[in-house]
Amino acid sequence: MACGIVSLASASVASTRLSALAASDSSLSAAKAATAAAQTAAGEYSLDTTCTDSRVYFDCVHMAFRKASGGDAYNGTPLGRLIFRLSGAQLLPKHTSNVRMLCTGERMGCAYSYSWCQLEPGPPRLKAHLLVLRGRGRNAYGRSDELIVDDPALRACAHSLVDGGAYHGLEVVPGDWGTNTVLATPVRGAGKGTSRLAILTGLADAPPATRRSLLLDHAVIGVLEPAAAAKAPALWGPGERTGREGLRRDALSAVVDALGKSRNPVKVSSCGEIFLGGQTSVVSCRFVPTPGVSGA
């Protein structure tokens, strides 16, 4: 399939990001911005050192059909926006930089982004706690077909789990609703070192065995921004999660509900980064189906 429309050209995403950061962060000098832009133009995808606390987002859509072609392949109901703060950049710079660049599409646009990739539930016993975003199997950091391995950094931020094993990156504390929902990438087993992502939720009050199953062999690189989805149940107002009466319902609950009640897929319609000054980069891809082959 060939790429069709990208709402923000990938060649300009990096310079747009640097301009936004330069305007909102006086510590980023013009010389540093020029050097980073030159490296990007030359195809040198080095570690992102301009911002260690990026915010990325995923706009989610519940598709109208399980399989469709042409314009019908993009018909669906918007479910809202998931925003994650990538606070793990200092702990795991390679993994975090890869995810950020796959959200901005600044390397090669659609071919290296999460736009129109599918969100899938975890296994039955974990489906209320785990969403998987596989990506397109191409990394934006380094060589696209090379697994990201950062063993020294992983060892430095390892956290032991009950009954053995460990996870890495940001610490997830039981009972802490600030880390109830996190963004993680596998560091062992299926999807290790690739574009695959896991959204782990319900960690604050999950039983120890469930927490271990979710966190084991993952690197936690981001946290869902404080919003409705991050509140403890006791903090919800009357009817706040129903949605049916037109009251507010958070995007994460909407995604989980859609996956649990329908066989139609949920996809990321667009993704990008939210800069310090409020500007955003957007990657929203439309793929042109090969004649005779069903759509995305």
Image (spheres, helix red, strand yellow):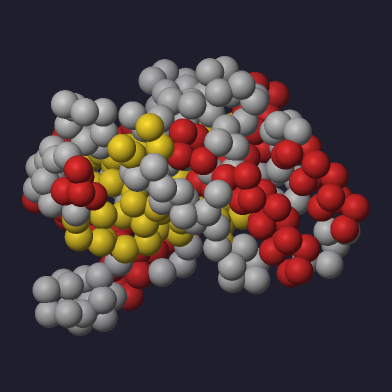
In this image, 231 relative to 25: left or right?
Answer: left
Q: Which residue is found at the position 20% from the left and 60% from the top?
A: 77
Q: Quadrant of the C terminus?
A: top left
The vertical placement of 21 against 213, above or below, is below
The vertical placement of 202 against 148, above or below, is below
Q: Which residue is found at the position 26% from the left and 54% from the top?
A: 61
Is residue 6 visible in the rendered structure shown here?
yes
Foreground pick, 278 / 220: 278
Q: Quadrant of residue 69?
A: top left
- The image position of residue 39, as x and y in percent, is 78, 37
Foreground pick, 219 / 269: 269
Q: Which residue is found at the position 35% from the left and 45% from the top?
A: 286
Q: Quadrant of the N terminus?
A: top left
- The image position of residue 54, as x and y in percent, is 61, 54
Q: Quadrant of residue 273?
A: bottom right
- The image position of residue 139, as x and y in percent, is 53, 28
- The image position of residue 126, as x and y in percent, is 24, 38
Foreground pick, 12 / 225: 12
